[in-house]
Amino acid sequence: MVGFTAPTLILFLYLNQITANNLNEVVNEINEFSISDEESEKDYGICEECGNENTDENWCLKCNSQRFQQNFGNWTSGNKDVDAIIQESQSNSTNLHLFVEWVPYSQFEDIKYIDKGGFGKIYSAIWKEEPIVSWDIRKK
């Protein structure tokens, strides 16, 4: 995994109100962002691993979707609807900006309460690791 060189400061919400009723709406919004006629016209080359066309620079939908899916059993948010949203975004992401990454609480440090929002409490924190931006296929 290759990432940013500095820890990422993020704000995160504790999601406690995701329901099956709005799950489809959230998934549809994620899919709308994943599909762009303008972007699909670009040529990003061929995936070195599987031979399919890349869907973005250094991003193969098929290979990265498989990597994410192989890891689904290794994490859970504790909420099946939230898990479904994350898994859907990871399975269909055409580039590194269009998926939700589950980050365990243990990967945050310097956690500070900011305020209470409409759906939960708002915190700031430093992410100890780095977001996924690509995989080193030589490491498998």
Image (spheres, helix red, strand yellow):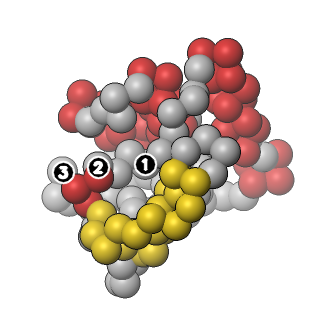
Q: Residue at x 39, y 63 (%)?
A: 131
The amino acid beneath tag 2 is Pro
Name the N-terminal-most of marks 3 and 2. 2
Q: Residue lying farthest bottom? A: 6
Q: Label 2 to label 1, Cα distance in Å?
A: 10 Å
Residue 129 shows in the view: yes
The residue at which mark 1 appears reads as 101
The residue at which mark 3 appears reads as 140
The residue at which mark 2 appears reads as 104
Residue 44 horizontal side relative to residue 49, left or right: right
Q: Residue at x 36, y 73 (%)?
A: 126
Q: Position of residue 24 (x, y in %)?
A: 67, 21
Q: Position of residue 83 (x, y in %)?
A: 43, 29
Callout 1: SS: loop
Closer to us: 93 or 45 = 93
The amino acid beneath tag 1 is Glu
Front position among marks 2 and 1: 2
Q: Residue lying farthest left? A: 139
